Amino acid sequence: MYLKTMKDFYAKYFKYVFYAFAFFLPLNEKVSTLLIVLLAILTAVGFSLNRLSLNREKNTVLWLFPVLFIVYGVSLFFLSECIELKFLENKLSLVAFPMIFSIRQDVDRTSILRFFVFGCMLAYFICLGNSFVNAIVLENGNYVFNPLNNNSRTFFEAIMYEGNVFFGKYFSFMYHQTYFAVYLSFSLLILNVYKAVFYKWLVFLGNVIFPIGVIQTMSMAGFGSLMIVGFLVLLFHVQKQRTKMILFGGFLVLLIGGASVHPRLQKLFKDLRKNEIVLKPDAMDGIMLRLLSWDSAIEIVKERPLTGVGIGDSQKALNEVYAQKGYIHPLERNLNAHSQYLQIMIESGFIGLLVLIMILMALLNKIAITQGSDRIIIISFVTLMVFNFVFESVLSRYIGISFFAFFSCLLSYVPQKTS
């Protein structure tokens, strides 16, 4: 009787844990982490109750992630002087999600994607509400609406230097701006590719707030992600050629218009016109700061191209190069390589980079056995990750590694009926 009750409970409610994780991923790191643990426990229980069995479908993505985790483990225990388990703890998603998805079960991919969109919508409104609250200040005994943190700056200057509570880190207070922008961009993609499963008013709302939210993050990589999503939706999802051409024209107008008013892009274009794109040791933000991190990372890769310096010593090695080259702010802020490709080569050399590329290629190969919306979402997800790996060390943060591992496993999964 007890065993039957447990099986019935599992069959009815396990899917809601999946939905809850997708919903809370853009909302709260601690809650989503606990839900990963719960998913792993319930998967193990289901397997022990013979409710689940191993998925015999060949899925290269699911075994490549644990291989990457092993590579990180080898780099920690055999290459690093600083051996601390914390370097592997935040990478446990590389093992947890493949384990969960490798055990045969019914996975409603579309519903999981829907709940991720709902979570991103709520996250946006929380950020927006927080900005409104912070914009109401007490001046001379009266409450006034003032979004500027520094009244000496103009509106656009305040945006650029993160002095406006509706933009930058003040707006995206729950997560780093670039990652939040990627979440919103991916939600915009899901909303348009699977629009049939959403109410029309939700599609309209998402198409308004998600692009605005990405712009509010003031992330150049996020702005690029938004442009990629817009381009891919037009390329794959719009069928009529005339409509596609009209929308492409509008897309280009928005792209040029957005680039012309984006403060950081304006600064970059200004430097290009003055031929000032050179390494500046005192650079404080934007692409100039990233160039310093990339330059230092390349120096380390040149010395240890095959194995890297080990995940435990990667930041120490970067800081040493920062100090040698006089890169002030990267050293003070303890910045990583700000590129996943360079970061993984520092940590585990070309071996780690090869495994990462194999994961992306294995996921992309899934388009051969998918069609329609599923094919579009896989191509778009891989494109987004390839692009953002250039600008962020995605696998160095929980919000990056859990997003990449979870959706890679989910999109690579071919649903089967549970026997």
Image: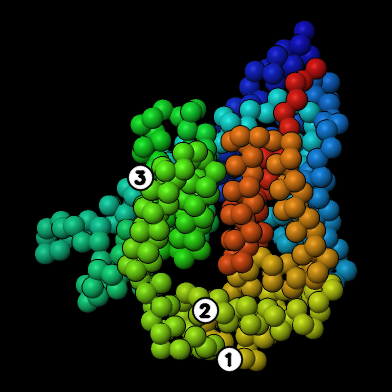
The residue at the far top in this view is 1
Q: CA distance from mark 3 to mark 2?
A: 31 Å
Quadrant location of the C terminus in the rendered image: top right
The residue at the far front in this view is 242
The 10 Å Cα crowd at callout 1, few under 14, some 14 to 19, many 20 or more, is some
Residue position marked by numbered label 2 in the rendering: 289
User: Is residue 327 shown above or below 156?
Assistant: below
Residue type, numbered disc 1: Gly
Q: Nearer the viewer, mark 1 or mark 2?
A: 2
| Residue at 88% from the left image edge and 69% from the top image edge | 78
**Residue 33 position by quadrant:** top right
Chosen colour scheme: rainbow
Q: CA distance from mark 3 to mark 1?
A: 44 Å
Q: Nearer the viewer, mark 3 or mark 2?
A: 3
Question: At which x and y percent is residue 64?
Answer: 81, 50
Residue position marked by numbered label 1 in the rendering: 326
Residue position marked by numbered label 3 in the rendering: 208
The 10 Å Cα crowd at callout 2, few under 14, some 14 to 19, many 20 or more, is many
Residue type, numbered disc 3: Val
Tell whether label 2 touches label 3 (CB within 8 Å).
Answer: no
Quadrant location of the N terminus in the rendered image: top right
* Residue 261 visible at all: yes
User: Is residue 290 shown above or below 220?
Assistant: below
Labelled disc at residue 110: none
Q: CA distance from mark 1 to mark 2?
A: 13 Å
Callout 3: SS: helix
**Residue 113 position by quadrant:** top right
Callout 1: SS: loop
Callout 2: SS: helix
